[in-house]
Image (tube, coloured by chain):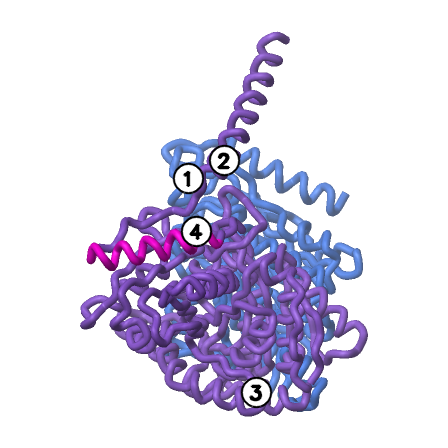
Chain colours: A purple, B blue
């Protein structure tokens, strides 16, 4: 084992290297590009035995990853944001091929307006595709998450592709100390790629991704994929146990912090949850019984586990770094449907924050905690909130004033010519 | 493995006498694209993986039936060349690691209609040539989005009536020169073919089999449903396309363009046009001499540059 100071991107590349991937179809996009640069450098220096090919788009890249995995090699790829959306047709398509490979997504907000900074609307767009989703909060988790994802994706009872998600900038470009597994141990854990029946060969007839006629066969294959994802819940613990035994690090499908006696709970995905941890520490010091629940496995969503963990709590704040236009936070509505109808369900409150890299401050976490307490006293959930401060609005007004002044000036110049 | 066709195609009797591709496909009667595919498959043999782009041929493999004896992968409309890249690379990796024997190697073949090849799939096709991908690419060109009912595409010829150009003058644009676009990439091989000239087609397939890298074929695919004619006329219309000079048979190797069939006495283009409903407005209710003359002049210009 080696301990190295690496970025989240580099940790993702290490994950792929340690998983012994054979093939990397690639396409650059900020903030993911460092992953494919690291892999390319290792291959060029002969430190890694794999082939990296730069395709002309993410749409093609994901096609190539799926078709290579369908031809008997372990494939890896990575993207972000607009790239994920550009490839979205193939995200759904290759998931239907039931072809196991791993793709890292470095989360970044979506256009419009265009931004480079992080939020989760990109990865949420892949929510219903049939990919497994593992969401990471630390660089260590990224490196380990890639290894876990291969085991899960390739498991004989699962056999679907997987996305390992990390937040752009906050993790992608942040260096943290990471324990990198010994190559031999990682290989032993991940094992040889077994393509099962997905192998194009001379003389061996194989048709894949055929058309179907009618809703009967179509529904059958779609239900099969859904059930395969649900099977991943059943095998996750087995894989995580084995990982913990070999590497000494445990990754439960839901990461819980100070949850045991908590009356109030923050629920978040990804690296911003580390901010919630800080807030939990401060609030605990002030006498609050509050904790954090972070689903690591988002697809399949561990609904039974979530019910078990949240039943009997007073109030739960779901803080979404995404926004479903006209509806609100995606994780919030998923939790609402998960908790609906159970006895002793907690009150549920929705907060949207952290869009396009916007910070969520400690004061905001404290204010959320206060609202949870009030909600619990009133017995009524507060209306959903879009986090935004007076200061931010003042800054925004300044930008608008500049934009208007510029516009007026251009207009004036034109009309005076 | 099924025996491959003889190595030299001089006469019609050298052509494979049985078809590898199974019967009973849902292609239309008289499909010119399917005829080209038959010949291609018969000569390449069953050690092939066909990587399909969305188009008419998607319906060749409908679960649980397939007419192919080898591999088939349906991808999407735009990314079949990328699908071929993944299959080729994977098989090369496995060959190198000795996880596959040379005997298990395959030829990877993209099949795509003109809708994908001339439009949405052009970027992926161009990039596959940039990367010098070792594959065969067959575009069956029926000059419109045939699978959705023949809307005009970038491959539609001037004046053709399609379901989105039903006006009295038909399609106002001109067929895109995909052959030259491909040739500008300087891939290993580019050729135009047509099933109605089977010997020319077979010789070209035989030639590209001896090469590696991108080997690109555009087959004009007479289309009874899209072009509006009786299916029994498919071969005749195909031959007329060549004899009138509408569809020049040519190839491009190492920067050299060569016409493999130069009609000595070109038939008037009217003979080709008048058999097809999509051009009927040029003849009825009255003979549109100006429009026909323009089409003829463009053909004559082309051949004037070829034969000088």
Quadrant in the picture for residue B186:
bottom right
Q: Residue at x 62, y 86 (%)?
A: A186
Report whether residue B296 is seen. Answer: yes
Whole-angstrom CA distance, mark 1 to mark 2, is: 8 Å
Q: Same chain for marks 1 and 2?
A: yes
Q: Does the CB distance between marks 1 and 2 fall below 8 Å?
A: yes
Q: Which residue is mark 1?
A: B165
Q: Which residues are magenta?
A: A362-379
Measured from the top left, where is residue A395 in percent x and y?
52, 34
* C-alpha separation, residue under disc 4 versus residue under disc 2: 62 Å
Letter of the chain that mark 1 sits on in the rendering: B
- Which residue sits at x=67%, y=68%? A10
- Give x and y (percent) for residue A196: 50, 88
Label 2 Cα neighbours within 10 Å, binned few <14 / some 14-19 / many ≥20: few
State the residue lying farthest toward the front.
A286
State the residue position of label 4. A364
Q: Sequence order check: which comes first, mark 4 or mark 3?
A: 3
Name the foreground residue: B183 vs A108: A108
Classify residue A152 as left or right of residue A182: left
**Residue A248 circle label:** 3
> How far apart are the alpha carbons under marks 3 and 1?
68 Å
Q: Are marks 3 and 1 in contact (CB under 8 Å)?
A: no
Q: In which quadrant will I find the C terminus of chain B?
A: top right
Q: Which of the 4 quarters of the picture holds residue A103?
A: bottom right
Residue holding disc 2:
B172
Chain for numbered disc 4:
A
């Amino acid at each position: 084992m080696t301990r190295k100071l690496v970025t989240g991107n580099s940790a993702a590349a290490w994950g792929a290297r340690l998983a012994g991937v054979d093939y990397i179809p690639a396409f650059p996009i900020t903030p993911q590009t460092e992953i494919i640069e690291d892999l390319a450098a290792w291959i060029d220096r002969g430190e890694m035995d794999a082939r990296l090919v730069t395709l002309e788009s993410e749409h093609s890249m994901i096609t190539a990853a799926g078709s290579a995995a369908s031809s008997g090699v372990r494939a890896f790829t990575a993207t972000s944001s607009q790239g994920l959306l550009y490839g979205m047709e193939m995200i759904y398509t290759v998931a239907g091929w039931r072809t196991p490979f791993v793709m890292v997504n470095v989360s970044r907000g979506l256009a419009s307006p265009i931004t480079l900074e992080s939020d989760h609307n990109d990865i949420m767009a892949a929510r219903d595709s049939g990919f497994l989703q593992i969401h990471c909060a630390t660089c260590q988790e990224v490196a380990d998450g890639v290894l876990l994802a291969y085991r899960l994706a390739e498991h004989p009872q699962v056999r679907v592709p997987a996305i390992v998600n990390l937040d752009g900038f906050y993790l992608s470009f942040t260096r943290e100390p990471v324990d990198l597994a010994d190559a031999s141990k990682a290989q032993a854990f991940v094992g040889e790629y077994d393509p099962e029946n997905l192998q194009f060969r001379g003389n061996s007839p194989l048709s894949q991704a055929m058309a179907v006629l009618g809703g009967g066969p179509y529904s059958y294959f779609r239900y099969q994929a859904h059930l395969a994802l649900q099977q991943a819940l059943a095998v996750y613990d087995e894989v995580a146990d084995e990982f913990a035994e070999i590497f000494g690090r445990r990754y439960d499908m839901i990461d819980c912090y100070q949850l045991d006696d908590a009356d109030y709970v923050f629920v978040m995905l990804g690296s911003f949850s580390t901010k919630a941890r800080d807030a939990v520490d401060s609030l605990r010091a002030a006498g609050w019984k509050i904790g954090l629940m972070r689903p690591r496995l988002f697809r399949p969503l561990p609904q039974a586990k979530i019910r078990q963990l949240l039943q009997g709590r007073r109030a739960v704040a779901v803080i979404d770094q995404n926004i479903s236009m006209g509806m609100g936070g995606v994780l919030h509505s998923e939790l609402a449907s998960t908790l609906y109808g159970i006895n002793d369900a907690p009150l549920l409150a929705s907060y949207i924050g952290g869009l396009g890299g916007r910070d969520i401050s400690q004061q905001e976490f404290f204010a959320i905690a206060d609202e949870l307490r009030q909600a619990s006293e009133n017995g009524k959930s507060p209306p959903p909130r879009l986090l935004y401060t007076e200061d931010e609005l003042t800054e925004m007004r300044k930008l608008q004033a500049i934009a208007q002044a510029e516009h007026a000036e251009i207009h004036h110049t034109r009309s005076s010519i | 493995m099924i025996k491959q066709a003889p190595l030299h195609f001089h006469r019609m009797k050298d052509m494979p006498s049985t078809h590898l591709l199974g019967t009973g496909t849902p292609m239309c009667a008289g499909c010119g694209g399917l005829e080209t595919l038959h010949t291609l498959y018969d000569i390449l043999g069953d050690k092939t993986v066909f990587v399909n782009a969305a188009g008419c041929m998607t319906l060749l493999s409908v679960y649980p039936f397939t007419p192919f004896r080898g591999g088939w992968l349906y991808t999407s409309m735009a990314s079949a060349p990328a699908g071929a890249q993944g299959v080729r690379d994977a098989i090369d990796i496995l060959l190198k690691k000795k996880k596959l024997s040379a005997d298990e190697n395959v030829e990877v073949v993209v099949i795509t209609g003109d809708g994908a090849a001339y439009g949405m799939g052009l970027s992926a096709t161009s990039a596959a040539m940039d990367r010098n991908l070792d594959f065969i690419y067959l575009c069956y060109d029926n000059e419109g989005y045939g699978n959705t009912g023949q809307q005009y595409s970038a491959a539609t010829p001037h004046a053709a009536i399609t379901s989105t150009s039903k006006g009295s003058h038909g399609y106002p644009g001109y067929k895109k020169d995909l052959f030259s676009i491909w040739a500008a990439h300087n891939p290993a091989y580019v050729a135009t073919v047509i099933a109605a000239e089977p010997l020319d087609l077979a010789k070209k397939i035989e030639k590209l089999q001896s090469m590696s890298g991108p080997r690109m074929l555009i087959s004009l695919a007479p289309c009874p449903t899209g072009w509006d004619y009786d299916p029994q006329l498919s071969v005749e219309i195909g031959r007329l396309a060549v004899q009138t000079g509408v569809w020049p048979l040519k190839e491009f190797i190492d920067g050299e363009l060569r016409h493999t069939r130069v009609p000595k006495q070109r038939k008037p283009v009217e003979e080709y046009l008048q058999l097809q409903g999509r051009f009927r407005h040029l003849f009825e209710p009255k003979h549109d001499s100006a429009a026909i003359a323009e089409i003829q002049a463009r053909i004559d210009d082309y051949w004037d540059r070829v034969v000088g």
